[in-house]
């Protein structure tokens, strides 16, 4: 993560319109969301958002306070990066030839990634890990030619037995 980024863990009601209200809060204040991931929790009535935002201490404090005021927000916490397990996922389709296929496959093994689709002129690869790992794989893949890629927003959970 970049120096000015911070991670928010947010528990919200699991129903329509909640994502719009949360993202609208950021839009109204002119704050940019660098990464957003939303999914159902162990309780089907609740969803968990992992939001990564760039900003100074003022933006950090205001974001937490304003999110806490929203009706559908049940809990919001800053998750310190040093006390979090953070993972991101990348699906990337890389151009290959008969000559380059083995080099790409070797890199997949080095990065502990997975080939999920394989054909004569392209390989689709799943890479999971810290943002820096995904960035490094993307840079490697550029030398072969990236046909297409998509990245999921980061997920973050506190280390240890504490829960959001």
Image: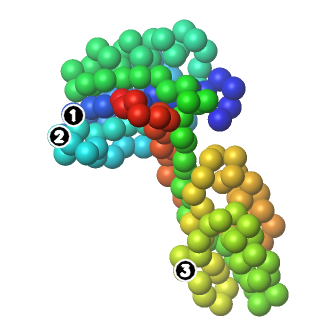
Among numbered discs 3 and 1, the one appearing first in the sequence: 1
For residue 131, side relative to residue 44 (left or right): right
Are there few (<14), some (14-19), or many (20+) residues within 10 Å of tag 1?
some
* Residue holding disc 2: 45
- Asked if labels 1 and 2 touch by Cβ distance under 8 angstroms, the answer is yes
Closest to the observer, 97 or 107: 107
Which secondary structure, mark 3? strand
Which secondary structure, mark 1? strand
- Asked if labels 3 and 2 touch by Cβ distance under 8 angstroms, the answer is no
Q: Is residue 36 visible?
A: no
Q: What's the distance in space between the residues labelled 2 and 3, CA to CA?
A: 35 Å
Q: Quadrant of residue 10?
A: top left
Q: What's the distance in space between the residues labelled 2 and 1, CA to CA?
A: 6 Å
Q: Residue 133, image x and y in percent?
A: 69, 52
* Residue holding disc 3: 117
Among numbered discs 2 and 3, the one appearing first in the sequence: 2
Are there few (<14), some (14-19), or many (20+) residues within 10 Å of tag 2?
few
Q: Nearer the viewer, mark 2 or mark 3?
A: 2
Looking at the rendered image, the quarter that the N terminus falls into is top right
Looking at the rendered image, the quarter that the C terminus falls into is top left
Q: Residue 130, image x and y in percent?
A: 62, 47
Q: How is the image coloured?
A: rainbow
Among numbered discs 2 and 1, the one appearing first in the sequence: 1
* Residue holding disc 1: 13
């Amino acid at each position: 993560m970049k120096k000015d980024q911070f991670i928010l863990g947010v528990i919200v009601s699991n129903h329509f319109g909640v994502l719009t209200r949360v993202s609208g809060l950021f839009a109204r204040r002119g704050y940019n969301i660098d990464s957003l991931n939303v999914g159902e929790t162990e309780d089907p009535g609740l969803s968990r958002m992992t939001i990564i935002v760039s900003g100074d201490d003022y933006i950090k404090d205001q974001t937490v306070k304003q999110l806490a005021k929203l009706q559908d927000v049940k809990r919001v916490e800053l998750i310190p990066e040093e006390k979090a397990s953070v993972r991101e996922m990348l699906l990337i389709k890389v151009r290959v030839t008969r000559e380059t296929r083995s080099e790409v496959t070797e890199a997949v093994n080095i990065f502990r990634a997975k080939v999920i689709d394989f054909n004569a002129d392209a390989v689709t690869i799943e890479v999971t890990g810290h943002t820096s790992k995904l960035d490094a794989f993307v840079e490697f893949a550029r030398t072969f030619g990236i046909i297409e890629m998509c990245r999921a927003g980061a997920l973050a959970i506190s280390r240890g037995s504490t829960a959001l």
